[in-house]
Image: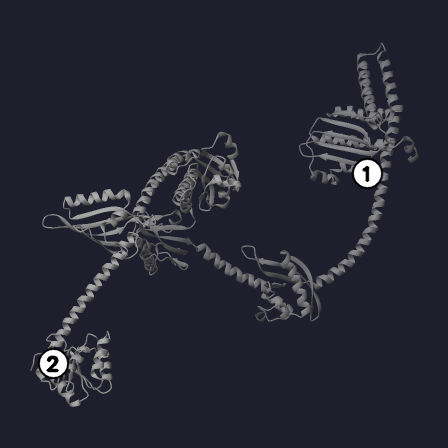
């Protein structure tokens, strides 16, 4: 048995092809015994299909096959990339000539055997072909690896934009690879391979330097070489290259060869240039930012910044404007490069005016180039200053415009994009600085306000602590160790019997106060809240205390809070609701009593909602309307009453709803015994916020009362007729009495005058004669002393009688009144009142008083009565009597500065014991006059008698 072709790997797959089954079997058996896996095919088509599908390592192929012969099959296998690696061993018994062998090998066969074939020869050929296949596979893998490496290297150099060179220093031949031609600006394949071409494309400024470095490196026998130089492209473009190479030397130390790589670093060089510019600009921006951030004067913001960047940007001037609060105009803050005579024209700009105004209105940068060639109207102002390039940026903070900042150059026609970006950044710094100044001012103000607020907060916190301490509800705090941490004054009552309190174990304190199991349940709630942070709102609590016999009710809840030091605790808020519970019990009892009262009330009481649905009616209401009260709830008047009656109720209810006021009205309601009249008082029920939610009505049956009122109205009409008759009779009697009183007063005065004349003419005369005779008797010479004394006593009696008689005559009828009229009588009366202790000042603005005799008499009597009232009641010793004629009326006033009277005293003027003023008023009214009284307690009294004046002829006619 020959050895296995593979000892460590799977057996090779061999496709055995022959149309002769016996030969195919014998050959396959030989191969299988040698350890190969053998598949069989009998035609060319089958062979191609199996080879493409199974990819065998070797095909033993008979030349003569039906359909496609072996030669064609071999050609197709070698032509297919998927099967070209398959080794083909052609065998034939019919084609065994040298030409047949040559044709088979040239057709692609890897070996050719003619039958009959010895098994050993067959196996040796198969093993040789399989070894050859393995070596070919290794070669293919190596080729693929090398190809891939070359491809990756080329791709890498292409991707890195690199070129390779190989320079034969002795011959001067130069080879370029990769992207070298493209980097040199040449078309692919146009490089001539001469070193002189490299020198020609070098930048003229770099040629001497580069060759000098090359010679120096070779003289020093440097192995490595690196340099940067520039290529000048045919289009004039300049590109920077970075070259890295290696020298090779012969045994004599002469440089014979140099290889290397070159890369285009133009972008890097440009970036470095931009970076240098950017670094300079960043330095300038940092310097400007520092200047802006350290400046506290708005006018000094920009001058220093302008000097910082002026040389870098070749600037000749700037304008810094501030926007007004209305957002309509700009005001110049500072500028540079502007002549003095131009300043007035640029002090203020309206939005849209000139270039700065346009930037402010549009909220975007305004850029102008080559202004000396511009005819734009808005640019003429800066153009007149010789400016050629101009940029104006709005100074913005968010959406808010602070102003504008513009830069001008007379030596440049335009600013680059980077220049504009740099200026924009500078403007943002300026805007930030302006905003900083505003914010600093605002911060100072807010700081002061915050300090005031903090002080107020401290006061508020202290006040809040005092409020919590003095609150009617209880608050206490339990700390993380489950000890009592803090207790306000409202909670002290609960812990009265727990001493010491602060720092006491809370569970121990609760068990002192409350009995089990409530104490344990409450402790569990507190521990759960402390552990989980879950708040607990307890149901209403009513318990008998453990430490006393009192039954108390509480509403309480607990929450976890953060205590100082970052530790948790539990705060309990509770409110003793014992009084509330008692009040609720009392309220329920009161509601029961109220319902009983309502049900027993004789009036019909009902409550409806806004839609007229019945909410409540008492028993009387249900009885009056014949309802079952339990079946009326929720029903409207249209469901309970006839439509006409329901309309009446709804209309009346609507008046109350719309006005919001209570209304009382009468409603006619049909009953079994006829129409009854009810007086209904309807009003709105309101919630605690004052919003109406229902209408309540109280209806009372007043049918009997209405009948009684109708009867009473009839009686009242009859009574009014009788009263009118009696009133007319009384008024007539009163008029007669007033006339009679006036006549009596006149008659009294006349009788007084008659009596006074009689006393004067008779009694006074007789007393005077008697006294004269007594004087003669006293002159008799022979009188004894005793007789003289008697006569003297009799003379004194006569004198007293005469004086009394004269006084009585004067009081009955003053001589001045009788002889000189009312004014003189009033003056006499004033003098007379001095004897009784009242000093009267009489003031008259008329020479005489135009009154009739009857009026004068009554006025005199009234004044005398009023003066005596002053003497008795005013509590003063002085009074004033004024007499005047005004507007056809005679006005006589008695005035004092005494105690005065109030309205009640005036209203009692007609009561017994107070008839003085009443009598005076009646007398005046009888004469067609009136009595005016002005008085107030402590301010004295003025009583004025007013009578219409009359002429003497009128008085005679009336008399």
Apparent side of residue 573 relative to residue 82 in the rendered image (left or right): right
Quickly name the residue at label 1: 925
Q: Is residue 82 visible?
A: yes
> Would you place residue 204 above or below residue 570 in this image?
above
Query: Observer-nearest residue: 58 or 110?
Result: 110
Residue 513 in the image: x percent, y percent? 34, 54
> Would you place residue 27 above or below residue 739 in this image?
below
Query: Observer-nearest residue: 30 or 812?
Result: 30
How dense is the environment of label 2, judged by Cα within 10 Å: few (below 14), some, or many (20 and up)? many
How much space separates mark 2 and mark 1, taking CA atoms? 167 Å
Query: Observer-nearest residue: 725 or 338?
Result: 338
> Would you place residue 289 above or below residue 513 in this image?
above
- Quadrant in the picture for residue 633: bottom right
Quickly name the residue at label 2: 35
Point 24% across, 42% down: residue = 208
Residue 846 in the image: x percent, y percent? 82, 26
């Amino acid at each position: 048995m020959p050895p296995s072709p593979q000892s460590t790997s799977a057996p090779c797959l061999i496709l055995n092809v022959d149309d002769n089954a016996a030969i195919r079997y014998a050959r396959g058996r030989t191969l299988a015994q040698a350890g190969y896996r053998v598949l069989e095919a009998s035609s060319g088509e089958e062979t191609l299909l199996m080879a493409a599908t199974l990819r065998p390592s070797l095909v033993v192929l008979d030349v003569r096959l039906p359909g496609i012969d072996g030669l064609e099959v071999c050609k197709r296998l070698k032509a297919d990339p998927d099967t070209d690696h398959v080794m083909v061993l052609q065998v034939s018994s019919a084609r065994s000539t040298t030409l047949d062998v040559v044709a088979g090998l040239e057709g692609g066969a890897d070996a050719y055997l003619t039958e009959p074939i010895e098994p050993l020869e067959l196996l040796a050929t198969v093993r040789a072909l399989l070894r050859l296949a393995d070596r070919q596979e290794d070669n293919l893998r190596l080729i693929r690896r090398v190809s891939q490496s070359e491809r990756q290297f080329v791709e890498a150099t292409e991707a890195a934009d690199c070129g390779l060179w190989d320079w034969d220093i002795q011959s001067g031949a130069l080879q370029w690879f990769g992207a070298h031609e493209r980097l040199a600006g040449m078309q692919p394949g146009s490089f001539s391979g001469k070193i002189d071409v490299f020198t020609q494309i070098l930048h003229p400024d770099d040629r001497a330097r580069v060759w000098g470095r090359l010679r120096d490196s070779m003289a020093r026998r440097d192995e490595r070489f690196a340099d940067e130089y520039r290529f000048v492209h045919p289009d004039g473009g300049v590109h920077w290259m970075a070259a890295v190479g290696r020298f090779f030397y012969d045994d004599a130390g002469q440089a014979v060869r140099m290889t290397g790589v070159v890369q285009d670093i133009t972008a890097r060089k440009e970036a470095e240039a931009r970076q240098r510019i950017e670094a300079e600009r960043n330095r300038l921006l940092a310097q400007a930012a520092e200047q802006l951030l350290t400046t506290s004067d708005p006018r000094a913001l920009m001058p220093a910044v302008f000097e910082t960047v002026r040389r870098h940007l070749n600037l000749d001037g700037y304008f810094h404007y501030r926007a007004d609060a209305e957002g309509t105009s700009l005001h110049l803050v500072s500028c540079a490069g502007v002549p003095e005579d131009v300043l007035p024209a640029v002090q203020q700009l309206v939005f849209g005016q000139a270039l700065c105004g346009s930037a402010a209105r549009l909220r975007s940068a305004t850029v102008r180039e080559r202004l000396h060639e511009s005819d734009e109207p808005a640019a003429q102002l800066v153009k007149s200053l010789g400016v050629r390039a101009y940029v104006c940026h709005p100074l913005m903070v968010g959406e808010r415009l602070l102003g504008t900042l513009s830069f001008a150059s007379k030596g440049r026609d335009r600013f680059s994009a980077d220049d504009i970006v740099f200026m924009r950044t500078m403007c943002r710094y300026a805007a930030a600085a302006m905003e900083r100044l505003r914010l600093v001012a605002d911060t100072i103000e807010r700081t002061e306000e915050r300090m005031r607020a903090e002080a107020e907060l401290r006061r508020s916190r202290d006040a809040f602590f005092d409020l919590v301490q003095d609150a009617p509800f209880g608050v206490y705090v339990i700390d993380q160790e489950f000890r009592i941490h803090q207790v306000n004054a409202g909670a002290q009552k609960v812990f009265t019997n727990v001493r010491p309190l602060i720092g006491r174990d809370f569970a121990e304190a609760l068990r002192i106060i409350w009995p089990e199991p409530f104490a344990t349940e409450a402790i569990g709630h507190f521990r759960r809240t402390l552990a989980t942070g879950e708040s607990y709102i307890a149901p209403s609590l009513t318990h008998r205390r453990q430490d006393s016999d009192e039954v108390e009710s509480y509403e309480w809840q607990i929450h976890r809070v953060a205590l100082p030091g970052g530790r948790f605790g539990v705060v309990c808020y509770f409110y003793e609701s014992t009084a509330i519970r008692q009040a609720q019990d009392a309220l329920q009892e009161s509601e029961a009593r109220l319902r009983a009262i309502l049900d027993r009330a004789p009036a019909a009481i009902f409550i409806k909602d806004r839609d007229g649905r019945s909410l409540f009616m008492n028993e009387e209401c249900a009885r009056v309307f014949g309802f079952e009260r339990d079946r009326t709830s929720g029903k409207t008047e249209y469901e309970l009453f006839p439509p006409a009656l329901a309309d009446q109720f709804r209309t009346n209810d609507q008046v109350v709803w719309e006005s919001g006021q209570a209304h009382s009205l009468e409603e006619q309601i049909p009953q079994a015994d006829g129409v009854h009249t009810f007086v209904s008082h309807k009003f709105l029920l309101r919630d605690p916020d004052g919003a109406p939610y229902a209408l309540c009505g109280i209806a009372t049956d007043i049918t009997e009362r209405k009948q009684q009122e109708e009867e009473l109205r009839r009686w009242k009409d009859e009574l009014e007729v009788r009263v009118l008759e009696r009133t007319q009779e009384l008024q007539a009697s009163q008029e007669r009495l007033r006339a009679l009183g006036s006549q009596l007063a006149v008659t009294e005065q006349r009788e007084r005058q008659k009596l006074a004349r009689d006393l004067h003419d008779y009694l006074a005369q007789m007393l005077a004669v008697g006294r004269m005779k007594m004087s003669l008797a006293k002159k008799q010479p022979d009188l004894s002393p005793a007789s003289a004394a008697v006569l003297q006593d009799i003379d004194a009696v006569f004198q007293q009688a005469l004086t009394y008689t004269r006084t009585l005559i004067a009081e009955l009828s003053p001589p001045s009144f009788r002889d000189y009229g009312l004014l003189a009588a009033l003056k006499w009366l004033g003098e007379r009142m001095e004897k009784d202790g009242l000093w009267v000042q009489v003031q008259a603005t008329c020479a005489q008083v135009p009154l009739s005799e009857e009026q004068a008499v009554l006025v005199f009597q009234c004044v005398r009565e009023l003066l005596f009232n002053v003497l008795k009641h005013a509590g003063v010793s002085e009074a004033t009597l004024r007499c005047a004629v005004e507007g056809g009326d005679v006005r006589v006033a008695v005035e004092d500065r005494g105690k005065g009277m109030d309205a009640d005293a005036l209203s009692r003027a007609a009561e017994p014991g107070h008839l003085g003023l009443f009598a005076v008023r009646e007398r005046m009214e009888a004469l067609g006059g009136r009595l005016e009284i002005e008085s107030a307690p402590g301010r004295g009294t003025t009583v004025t008698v007013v009578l219409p004046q009359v002429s003497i002829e009128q008085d005679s006619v009336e008399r």
